[in-house]
Amino acid sequence: MIKNLKKGKLIILSAPSGSGKSTIINHILERGVSVHFSISATSRPPRGNEQNGVEYFFLSPEEFRKRIKDGDFLEYEEVYVDRFYGTLRSEVEDRLHRGENVILDVDVAGGLNIKKIYGNEALLIFIKPPSIEELQRRLEQRGTDSAKVIADRIAKAEYELSLADSYDCIIVNDDLEKAKKNTESAIKEFIIL
């Protein structure tokens, strides 16, 4: 049996909350683009019918801390006290070594950290809202967050937008269909390089 000797590539999508990143990633996956979504780890408990290894890898806060100490994460963030999210190194590396392309949904700082590790084998795509005002409108329209949470997300978005120029590709989501198409094109072009 001949093994696939070609290592896969890594695609990292980041964006401020409300920019349409999850919608664009779902589009990429539904279109059958040759990428596999990397499941993140979290220390929060499962919600509803969520299953370990499907939506997230669910770890206790203690286990998450131990795995941080052991160097098991490419990136992680403690969003609230004992509420961690992160990308397991093994989840990405195993797929890449099998020749699979991997797509990640991570925050802006995490994306930049992963790029430092993978260099040219990773494509950083920043999904940018047309403006802070439009981003605020989108977050308010969701109807899922308090005014305080929205204000915190806008403050974080302003910081994240300041890092956009560090990304390989910036796609402005002022037209969702166009943003989906442009993201898909950028990924396909990167994969065949």
Image (cartoon, rainbow, N blue to C red):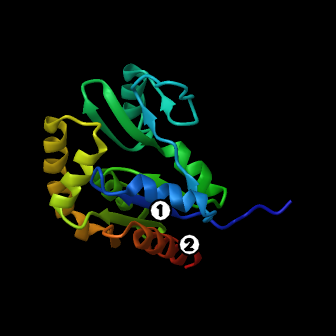
Residue furthest out toward the right? 1
| Residue at figure coordinates x 31%, y 57% from the top left | 19
In percent of width and height, residue 22 lies at 42, 52
Quarter-wise, where is residue 32 in the image? bottom right
Q: Out of 178 and 73, give the one closest to the viewer.
A: 178
In what quadrant of the picture does the C terminus appear? bottom right
In percent of width and height, residue 70 lies at 42, 33
Question: Mark number for residue 191?
Answer: 2
In what quadrant of the picture does the N terminus appear? bottom right
Mark 2 in CB contact with mark 1 (< 8 angstroms): yes
In the drawing, does residue 65 fall left or right of residue 193?
left
- Give the SS element for disc 2: helix
| Residue at figure coordinates x 44%, y 55% from the top left | 23
Q: In whole angstroms, how far apart are the C-alphas of marks 2 and 1? A: 9 Å
Q: Amino acid at mark 1?
A: Ile
- Give the SS element for disc 1: strand
Residue assigned mark 1: 11
Q: Out of 60 and 93, give the one closest to the viewer.
A: 60
